[in-house]
Each structure stands twice: as C-alpha cells, then as structure tokens.
Amino acid sequence: MNKDKNFIKAIIITVVVLFLYPKIMMRFFPQMFPAPEQNPKTHTTETIKQQTVINETESASTDSSSGVTYSKENSYVLENDTYRITVNSPQADVQKVELQQFIDPQTQQPTVVLDAEEKQRGVFATPELVDKAQLEDVISGSDKIIFIYKDLSGLTIKKTIELEDNTHIITLDIEIINESLQDQTVSYRMTSAAGIAPAEGIASRYQEILTILETEKRHKQHPGKVKKETLVPGAVKIAAFKTRYFSLAAIPFINCDYTYSYKNNYSDAQQSPSFGLGIDKQIIPAQGKKNHAFALYVGPNDSETMAISGLGIEEIRGKGVFAGFSDFLLSLLRWLHGIFNNYGLAVIALSLVLQTFLYPLTFKSLKSMKDMQALQPQVEEMRNKYKDDAQKLNKEIMELYKNNKVNPLGGCLPMLLQMPVFFSLYKVLMQAVELRGAQFWWIKDLSGPDALIVFSNTYPLIGNTFNILPVVMIAASFLQQKMTNPNQANEQQKMMALIMPVFLGAIFYRFPSGLVLYFLTNTIFSLVMQGFMASRASVAKEE
C-alpha cells in the first residue's frame, strides 16, 4: 500500500515539475521564448514615446521627404563561390546575403543570413552621405560594384562594394572627394547588420549584439532587449551581430566613434534591430579626398574560418580556457567525422573517446559512491540513535568515514574536475554549424530534436514532435539510478530516484539531438562501467 502511495506521489510531483519547468524558464530565461504579440491599441505611453524618438532619429538621418520609407529602384547581384548578395540602388546597401557553401536544412537552399525588408535599410547603408546626393553612375561586375554620387556642396562620393575571394569578407570602400574650395566636415552612420530574423527557443540565447572597443572593453546586448536607441561610445575595433551559427562582424579601418542599435518599430518584438558604426566630424580638405574602408565578415562562428582574413575577427568568440578547449573538441569532432563520414557516429565516438580519457576520474567517483552506499545502513542507525543531537551525529558519521577510509567528497570532486569538459563540449554541440542539417538514422537534423514522429498539431509539453532519444535517456538514467543506489535508505531517496530521470528527460526533450546523443552515450558507457564494477565486486566477494 505504501509503495502505491509513494508511486502516486512521485507521479504527482513529476507532473508538477513538468508544468512548472517552462514557467520557471520563461521567468529567468525570457529570451528563449518568443514575445507575445501586442495589441496596437494597448501600447503604453513609453512605447509611443520610443516610437516617436526613433521616427525623429530616422527622419533626421535620412533628411528626405519620404521619412523612413525605403526606396528601391534597381537591384544588382554580386556572386562568387562564397556569397550571393543583392545590392540595391540608389542607397547602395546590401539587402540580402546568401552563403553558398552552407545549405539551410529547412529550404535545402543556400543559407540566407540577412534579408532586410523593403522598408529597412540594408548593410552598408550610409544615408547621411547619399540621401542628399544625386546618383550619377553605377558600374557593376560579377563580384564588384561602384556607386558614384554628387551633391550640391561639391562632394563626390564613390561607394565600392566588393567580394573577396577565398574568404568570408565583403569590403566597402567609401571615397569622399571634395571638389570645393573650402574644407568640409562629414558625419555619418554605416549599417553593419540589419534584416536578421529573430530567433526563437534555444537559438535566441545565442543572438547577441557585441561591440569591442580598442581598449578591449566589450559591450553586449541581446537584440530582443533593444527598447530604445543605444549608443556605445569609444574607438570601435569590431562591431558584431552574432547568431547561433553565424556572425556579421564589421571592422573599420578608420576611427569610428561609437556603435548604435535601434529598431524602426519598438513595439514589434519580432523585428530585427539595425546595428552599425558611427563616424563623427571627418574633415575633407578643399580640393582633397579621403578614403574610408570597412570589412564585413559574414560567415560561421568558427575560429579557423574567421582567422583566414587575418583581421582578428575570431576575438568575437571570446577568449580563455573554455574557448580554446572548445576549439580543440571541435577539431576532434571533425577528425572523427573524417573517419566515420557521419556526424552522428562522430558524436558517439567523441563521447567514447572522452569517457575513456576521463575513466580514472569516473571510476574514482563511482567507487566512492559504492563505498558510501556500503556504509548507509550504519549511517541510518546513527541518525536514529543521535536524532536529537546533530553535533554528535555529525561527529560519529565523520568518524565512521575516517575509520573506513571513505571521503564524503570523493564522489563529487571527480565530477567537478570534469565540468570544464562538460561546458566546452556543451558549447561545441550546441553551436557547431557542422551538425546543422547533419543526418543520422531517422534524425534529419542533429542541430534540432530527433523528431521520430512529427504531429500535425502541437501538444502540451512535447510540442509537435515525439522525440525518442530523451525517452531512452530517461530509461537509461533510471536504470543508472537503480544500479548506483540499489537499496535507497529512505522514501525520499526512492522518490528522487524516480523523479530525477524524468526531470532530466524533460530538460533535454527540446535540446539538439546531437547533444542528447552525446549524453545518452555517456549514460550507457557509465552503465557498462558500473556493471563491470559490480561483477568484479561479486567475484571478489565469492573468492
């Protein structure tokens, strides 16, 4: 009867945990969830004020009778083995960037990194320079295009956009020629990121607006948190917009005074913000000229690819031990893929390689837990004997451990030593572009849930897919709990042994299948190891 009651309690607690988990995650990690649509009639006063501010800013920056309306007359396509980009006139801004070498698993077409709406200025937009000028000529080629403008003040502006070969770099060169007889001062902004689709769920956690100043100071902002125009003053070294797999990183070759980010419509939580560089008070001498050059990296968040340009773009990935170890693990994963020619098998092999490497620590941890289990009956006796004297109880328990040469922390310390590996590997498997669209058995995309069955409707807790790997992981974790603690000392431990595997499976249910596959392999490896240890202990006992 008691077992039935405990089972019912465990089921109730599990349901409560599964119900509260998404609410807790939404409370502390709101960026993982899409913002609810707002009713235009219920906008707050603050929202209206923010809309007014940005409309005034945009109108001032464009200084055109059309306000924030984006005009497009012609489109030009530049293309090489790396990129296919669409450049519009008369603004000479890049409205669309496609990466030829990265296929989108959803569309099976080249990945579109950015696609600015017609009312949103694209990358390389410089409204303060060209909106008052007259477009005189456009000279276009397959991988290079030149826009030539003239304004009434005597300035000639040449904007040259070019694709570099064998790199993920797009260059912008702005030549400002002062044909007048007096010095002129120009200030302008250059858009470095726009038209990037807001991400939902896990992918949203990896979207980031990043400014790195020449002082190495970093300023980070989640694009979903852009509520008003944000300026980051200082000499800018790199201005980057990062997503889960790709980044846009602008490197100025002139002194840039600040970065900025804003939205055309602050009430629209799903609109991508614009981000760029600000250049203040550049003096163009009379009968002279100045060249302002910029490089834009659009490519994967991969240190090797970023390093090819020699511009230090890999700095946006961060520095430190974890970053270096993550790069090593990614290289190891690629090497294993070269052997097995499948990233699913490579992930399994990576798990086995690391578990073999960490075997001494894992063995020590399991042995310590086994020793602790053997002493549990005596510990329980002491708890009952000294239940009214906590100080005496603790002293007797520590004496028991000391006499039996058991370290209470022996099971935890080896696990703590493995944490750097865990964090580094978690980052690799969550962000490795190699897993994007990689197939393994029934899994069509290792960067998403395994989706054994896809439903036509969405259901509570599981969504619109049934993912089998987390379910198998629950079963394996439950079996591991039983092997680790075959005779739980009290009802609380028994209940936890039932709840924890389910809770773990709930957490992993929407995780990328590549990550779940890794931890499932780890769990099975630990089960085999525990079985081996149990058989050795049994043989030793018989002898």
Image: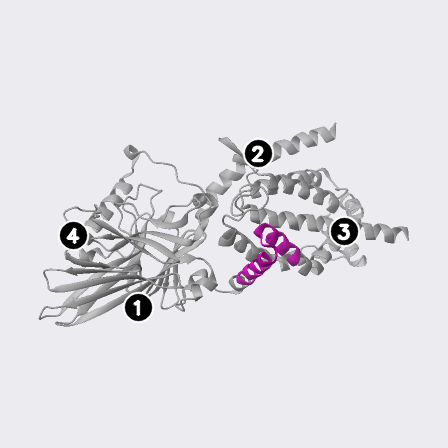
Measured in 3D between alpha carbons, the distance from the residue under mark 1 to the one under mark 3, in whole angstroms, is 62 Å
Q: Amino acid at mark 1?
A: Phe
Q: Is residue 462 visible?
A: no
In the picture of the structure, the residue carrying the numbered disc 2 is 16
- SS label for mark 3: helix
- Are there few (<14), some (14-19), or many (20+) residues within 10 Å of tag 3? some
Measured in 3D between alpha carbons, the distance from the residue under mark 3 to the one under mark 2, in whole angstroms, is 32 Å
Q: Which mark is in front, 1 or 2? A: 1
* Residue at the outermost right position: 543
In the picture of the structure, the residue carrying the numbered disc 4 is 63
Q: Earlier in the sequence, mark 1 or mark 4?
A: 4
Q: Amino acid at mark 2?
A: Val
- The residue range painted magenta reads 326-354
Q: Earlier in the sequence, mark 1 or mark 3?
A: 1
Q: Which mark is residue 159?
A: none
Above or below — where is 329 with respect to 65? below
